[in-house]
Image (cartoon, rainbow, N blue to C red):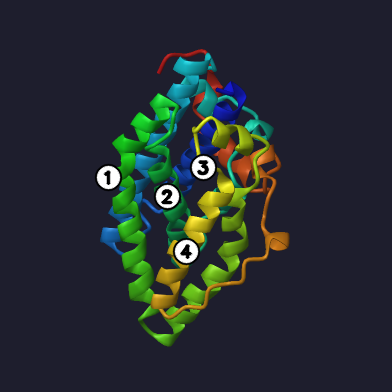
Amino acid sequence: MNNEAIKDLLYRMADDALIIGHRNSEWTGIGPMLEEDLAFSSMSQDKIGHAQALYNILYTSFGEKNPDVLAFQREEKDFRSCQLVELPIGEYDFSLMRHFLFDHAEAIRYELLQASSFAPLAALAKKVRGEIRYHVMHADTFVKQLSAGTEEAKARMQSALNYAFPYALGIFEPSDYDAALIADGVFAGETKLQQLWLEKVTAIVTAAGLQMPAVDTTKAVYGGRKGYHSEHLKPLLAEMTEVTSIDPSAEW
């Protein structure tokens, strides 16, 4: 197996989960209703747990630094998160739509990875599938409910979809290692993932009465997978690492 290819995949997944976990945690205490306050908090905790598990595979299988160092002591340029997860939470309509688009991609990714030839990743995929199934169910429920609500609610959901969609395409930013991952049976590749994701989210969006944006890869927001990020990641990392940066060598 190509170790560099597997490490690149693990960093993409772990960094996405860590960053969106922290972003969505910002709804704690300010959710539009108590149920959503609790839901976003719970899902954020799950995401950060997934990130920790992925960083731990990097540590135990490839000799990378320990999970705390990978999460809190890397430079912005070293992160491989897509730009979608870095964006501020904005209004609830945007956060919900990002949640919907991202978690469907994650659900399909982990479904594919259950058959991975890399045993630690296959085992993790089987372990977290229940949590991610809940995340997707939550997203689908509220996207459908709000899209079927008032004209203003439907318009806001459509606007959020239009805005988030080019960033969501960045989830599937082409990888230099896709051919190796496919050949080794580790992962089916970003192109296959995007195809399955489009089929899934298009069906749900259409059923909800929204208009699916056209897929235009020239407008896809790429860069995050190569270490080129939005202006929002650096301040978020500074906030996330505020405590550990006081004494990086301390044991908490």
Q: Would you name the residue on which mark 4 appears?
A: 199
As drawn, 231 above or below 158: above
Q: Which residue is mark 2?
A: 108
Asked whether the residues under the numbered discs 4 and 3 touch, taking CB atoms below 8 Å apart as contact, a structural biologist would say no
Mark 3 surroundings within 10 Å by alpha-carbon count, few (fewer than 14), some (14 through 19), many (20 or more): some
Disc 1 is placed on an element classified as helix
Picture quadrant of residue 2: top right
* Front one among 190 and 42: 190
Q: Residue at x 42, y 50 (%)?
A: 108
Q: Quadrant of residue 112?
A: top left
Q: CA distance from mark 1 to mark 3?
A: 21 Å
Give the image location of residue 174, x and y in percent: 65, 45
- Give the tally of numbered discs: 4
Query: Which residue is tagged 3?
Result: 188
For the residue carrying disc 2, how many other residues have a C-alpha within 10 Å: few (<14), some (14-19), or many (20+)?
A: some
* Secondary element type, mark 3: loop
C-alpha distance separating marks 4 and 2: 11 Å
Looking at the rendered structure, which numbered label has been put on residue 168?
none
The amino acid type of the residue labelled 4 equals Glu
Which is in the foreground here, disc 3 or disc 2?
Answer: 3
* Residue contact between numbered discs 1 and 4, judged by CB atoms under 8 Å: no
Q: Is 113 on the left or on the right of 42, as rendered?
A: right
Q: Residues within 10 Å of mark 4 (few under 14, many from 20)?
A: few
Location of residue 235 in the rendering, given as x and y in whole percent from the top left corner: 61, 42
Q: Quadrant of the N terminus?
A: top right
> In the figure, is residue 224 to the left or right of 155?
right
Q: Nearer the viewer, residue 47 or 10?
A: 10
> What amino acid is at disc 2?
Ile
Q: Residue flagged by tag 1: what amino acid is it? A: Gly
